[in-house]
Image (tube, rainbow, N blue to C red):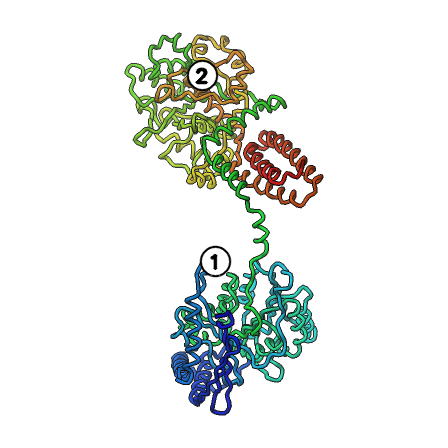
Amino acid sequence: MTQNAYRFYLKIQQVEKVCLFELAWGRGQQLSVTLPYPENLTIFYQDWQTKYLSFYHRALRGRVVSTGTIIRQVDWEQKLVQAEAKLLCEFHRWLRHEELFEIRAIIAQAAKQKTENFLPSQHNTHVPTIDIFLTCNSQELCRLPWEVWEITEFAASSKIRIVRQPINIHDTPVNYQSKPCRGKARVLAILGDDTGLNFQVDREAVKSLSPIAEVEFVGWQPHERQAELKDKIVKAIKDERGWDILFFAGHSNENLNTGGELAIAPGTSLSMIEIAQSLTIAKQRGLQFAIFNSCSGLSIANTLIDLGLSQVAVMREPIHNQVAQEFLVRFLQSLAEYKDVHESLLSACQFLKLEKNLTYPSTYLIPSLFCHPDAALFCLQASRIKDKCKRWFPSRKEAMALSALILCSWQLSTQSFLIEKRVLAQAMYRQFTNQPDSKNSPPVLLVEIDEESIKKAKISDPRPMDRSYIAKIITQLTAINAKIIGVDYLFDRHQPGNDRKLARTLRSSIEKQNTWFILATSRNQAGGWFEPLPELASPNWQLQGDTFIVGYDSYVTHFTLLPRQYSRKKPLPFAYWLAIAHWLNFEQSGELLQPQINSSDNWVSQVKNHINQTTGEYEFLDLFSNSSRLQPLTKFSYKLGQMWMHPIIDFSVPPEAVFQRLPAWQLLDSNDSPLLPLTILNKRPSIVIIAAGYKDAGLVPGGDNFPLPAAVGFWRSQHPANPSTVFTGGEIHAYMVHHLLNQRLVIPIPNLWLILLAALLGKGTVLVLGNSTKTQKQEIIFLWFLLTLIYALASLQIYISAAILLPWLLPTLTFWIYIFLYLINRKSIY
């Protein structure tokens, strides 16, 4: 059976009290049936129409002749529902007459056969449809709700759709498929007389097509003359750019002599005869579909299809303003989903029937679609941009290479390795360009208890470290007026005999010069924290800092971030408390906050409240760079196993610009301050960190020692006096303190992001090369080679100037793989 066998043409002619049903299909097949027309059908229709107009007596989009006095006490909704039931019952009873059985059987057989031949696929899951083009020769027949004719009881799973066509059609539609695509569809929306109406919903509904269509509005303005308005509308309709859709909202009425009338302004109408020529021109320029969201549109639809327009959607009866809006919103939603106009209209009617029938009864019977029999159903087309985008899809080899690079960049170990090497390159670049970042003296004095210090102190086992020895260091630091002392040792275990010495030393230092102490803490296996013993240090005069260090596969690369919100349950980072203490003692203006041994309030709360009162900030975590806090994007990336935009520790800064190293033995052997190194005497650092510098330091032996970062190794190679290959936790904390005080947090742009960008650039370049001559290809490739070098140099300077790390290796590799694969495939440049 051919495709035409699934399209039927049913013509119904009424001659006095008889109706002639003529069915045509396939290759000239025809069937005629004569059926009496029931007089009750007209009576029931008129009764339904009366009840319909009585219920929807206000805000109609048409001029309705009064049907008599409306009695407000009458339940017109109930009467309308009863009238609809009587009308449809009589209508279906008539159409189930045995004389029509053969017509229905032929249609049902075609539906069954189409269902059996239908093979659903990934791209075609729609239910097969049978279209019946219905023509009626009288207004009385045209007004009946033929769209609800229940032929489906024979129709298997196929959908039978009834579309209308006028009895007279003089012109033919334009073959739009032979015309070049204009890109986005164009919509002309005419907003007519809004007396008693509100078109805001209509306007917003049409504007919702803007992402996939160009929408323009035209309508009357106050004080605009009648002739000017008509001329403006006519010019808009026949715009040289053409339209795909014509939309009208407002009052309209039938008029057999003029082909229908549109109320375009108060007291001003425009007949279809007046704009027939403009509509014909618009049709030649692309107009395919018109929708009149107004009343009584049968004459309008007949006129437009007669002119050769492809499809017209109208309301056969007066329509309430809110119903028209509900219909339009649902219709345009379906149209925006690239459904054809018939499917969109049926979807909107189904919505009115199932979702809105209790609010707006009978309204699902009103909309109708008129269609030219030779025209394909109009639907919005997806932009040809999609076709162009397909050219940008990677080829098989490109996809394989891109996938491998993305997979590589996704690994945290790879990311840490690349950051390590990149920071090394930055250190070399700093030295070469003389940008060492040493504007100020180092803020930190790192007092290291190294192997030599342990030997000189005759400490047999540094695990745990002798607290009396730490007490001696603190005493000496107090003697040289050290204001802020961070101790990178845990004091959670008892050490009889030495605990009292350390406790007395801590209290004495605070009593003498209000020293700020930041003591180390760390999370234990039970989920709690290794807190200092209460007999050693009280939380009312000392701070506890988390010494956690971010590292992957032995690489220490990332900064330890502050949380988004402060919580007492989790201590803040060790380096952050040191930076806070420095700010309060050396940068804050106003009243100086000092720890007190006899304080009864928690010291953390005192510091937090003081900062809030002093700065006016609600969140005291905002003192330093916002980059030091965990950002939403970074937190989200953790769920993906990534560290997007997580700041790194900038080891490209020379250690001597970050801290001064002083072995503990040297500090203790100098009983008089003049024996201290000259640099410390000239300008004593404001922060002191007491940390381990021996091999067995840490919760587990060696846990506080880390592989030497490549950049730090480079700087140490410049000073042979320090050949150590060990990098301690104290040094890392010193770097983080330096970054906080100098607002120096380097943000790494994820490799993945720039790989995807490089892939787009690479594919775009390949597409350009494909349309270039041999000489042009050589010039383009040479230009990109220069740009690659420029990018490499620019990224080095951006790192220093803007604290942004732009990946270089993987994105560059991605781009040049595209070019290389193109050259291998084409072999056209040499």
Look at the image and tell me whether residue 59 can be seen. Answer: no
User: Dot 1, crowdedness within 10 Å: few (<14), some or many (≥20)?
Assistant: few
Q: Which residue is mark 2?
A: 447
| Residue 772 % position (x, y) | 68, 43
- Give left or right: position of 119 versus 764: left
- Give left or right: position of 273 versus 600: right
Look at the image and tell me whether residue 554 can be seen. Answer: yes
Task: Judge whether 478 appears above or below 166 on screen.
Answer: above
Task: Judge whether 155 appears above or below 180 on screen.
Answer: below
Task: Judge whether 823 appears above or below 279 on screen.
Answer: above
Q: Which residue is mark 1?
A: 123
Q: Nearer the viewer, mark 1 or mark 2?
A: 1
- Give left or right: position of 652 versus 281: left
Q: Secondary structure at mark 2?
A: strand
Label 1 to label 2, Cα distance in Å? 71 Å
Q: Secondary structure at mark 1?
A: loop
Of the two numbered discs 1 and 2 on the same chain, state the one appearing first in sequence.
1
Q: Residue type at mark 2?
A: Val
User: Dot 2, crowdedness within 10 Å: few (<14), some or many (≥20)?
Assistant: many
Question: Foreground: 563 or 5?
Answer: 5
